Image (cartoon, grey):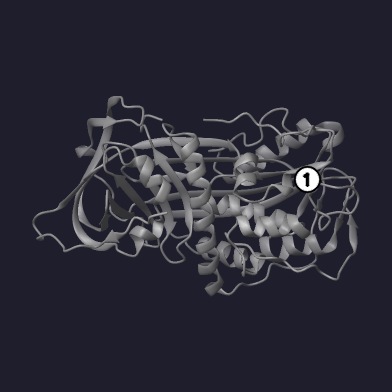
Amino acid sequence: MTDHIAGPPGTTSLDRRRFLAALLATPAVAVVLQACSDDRSTSIGQAGGEQRSGLARVGADPALAVDAATAVTAFGTDLYRRLAAERPTDNLVVSPASIALALAMASAGARGTTLTEMVATLRADGLDLHTAMNALDAELTARQRTDVELSLANAAWLQSTMSIEQAFLDTLAEQYGAGVRTVDFTTDAAAAQRAINGWVSERTNERIPELIPPDLLDADTRFVLVNAVYLNARWETEFDPEVTRDAPFTTAAGETVEVPTMAAERELRYASGDGWQAVELPYVGDELALLLFLPEPGFLTTFEEIFLVTDATQYLEPTLVRVLLPRWDTGSAFALADQLGALGMPTAFTLGADFTGITGDEPLRISDVIHQANITVGEEGTEAAAATAVIGEAGSAPPEDVPVRVVFDRPFVFALRDRVSGAVLFLGRVADPRG
């Protein structure tokens, strides 16, 4: 489901010069970044060029990746709950890590209340935001191996006539490996849109060919930040396509349909709690995995209101499991300004926003936050371009020759996660496997 993309309530495109924070599929952590004493500005120059800091990307402490992942997962769960409540019968997929990385880049230019709210929303109080995000990016990039392709990329596009604070340019380079590409939004916003979408399409293997829709950018646009993630991973043990059969699935709308359903019986990590089961399917290398939550019939809405990924992960135990899982290919597109404002960062979208850490030329605000994510799950693996706690219990293991049955014949929730750091790359709901 694609939302209508609009600015914050009560404002118009002429109220204030603004920038667009654009987010893409797949995989945060944030803390207040101290104001830098370096107040130099760099003139950007002509459109079609690129401005980079002279500083190289710095190495990161791997231990910080876990802290970043904890924040990303908490932020992603907050956002998912809000989206799930708004769309109770839709397929959903978001990338908490991708959204967090893009917002973290934007926060490098935020000051005052704007920055404080962004950090709190990202669940990053007490963290060195940019150092932690750099560590998480490096940790996830290290998952690359034969049969597991995982890439993350960051980029920025700025109005060519603007000057940019050197400290902001340095942070982009040192912590995000990004430079600034120059475009002229004022005279040719369509050309800027094509350039940004082309970059996104290339880095997502063409799974997201149009992140920025027509007419979203205009003469008032000053700044676009983008994070793109691409994943293509094979299961550690593939499903046999010869045993895939059509099987009934009751959608979130209550319709019973026949969908291609994979089947396997093997030892998998499994947990169960009050009203749910969970099973985890590892990818090659056993560092990335797809964690699947199956709520009992009628329990999905309540489950989505209270679940935490850690409810299952802390109780997962190797168990003989008979799993029946439909193939699915779903995607989502969102304009997230309203949701992010409601989560605690409204100032960034108003005339009171302070992004003077980016430029002193003119005041900026975030006009839109655009996010797309999609995921395809089949026999070989996955491609993706994302009050009262439910207490999980490992329980006693069944006899080895009697497998636990986990039949995904109704709506379920998934979290594609990095098992090492705990970061959630994709979080979503399959309400109807047909898409």
Position of 432 with respect to 101 (left or right) is: left
Q: Residue furthest front?
A: 387
Q: Where does residue 238 sit, x and y in percent of width and height?
A: 28, 49
Q: Which residue does the image show at 85% across and 59% down from the upper left? A: 165
Q: Where does residue 12 sit, x and y in percent of width and height?
A: 79, 32
The answer to whether residue 286 is seen in the rendering is yes
Q: Where does residue 34 sit, x and y in percent of width and height?
A: 75, 69
Q: Which residue does the image show at 62% across and 53% down from the upper left? A: 153
Which class describes the residues within 10 Å of circle 1: few (<14), some (14-19), or many (20+)?
A: many
- Which residue does the numbered mark 1 point to in the structure image? 365
Position of 394 with respect to 283 (left or right) is: left
Q: Where does residue 202 sit, x and y in percent of width and height?
A: 60, 42
Identify which amino acid the numbered label 1 is placed on.
Arg
Secondary-structure class at tag 1:
loop
Position of 276 with respect to 230 (left or right) is: left
The quadrant where residue 317 appears: bottom left
Q: Observer-nearest residue: 54 or 392?
A: 392
The answer to whether residue 23 is seen in the rendering is no
Q: Which residue does the image show at 30% across and 63% down from the upper left? A: 315
Above or below: residue 405 compared with residue 335: below
Q: Observer-nearest residue: 308 or 175?
A: 308
Q: Observer-nearest residue: 364 or 38?
A: 364
Q: Observer-nearest residue: 266 or 338?
A: 338
Above or below: residue 69 compared with residue 203: below
Position of 405 with respect to 409 (left or right) is: left
Location of the C terminus by quadrant is top left
Q: How many marks?
A: 1
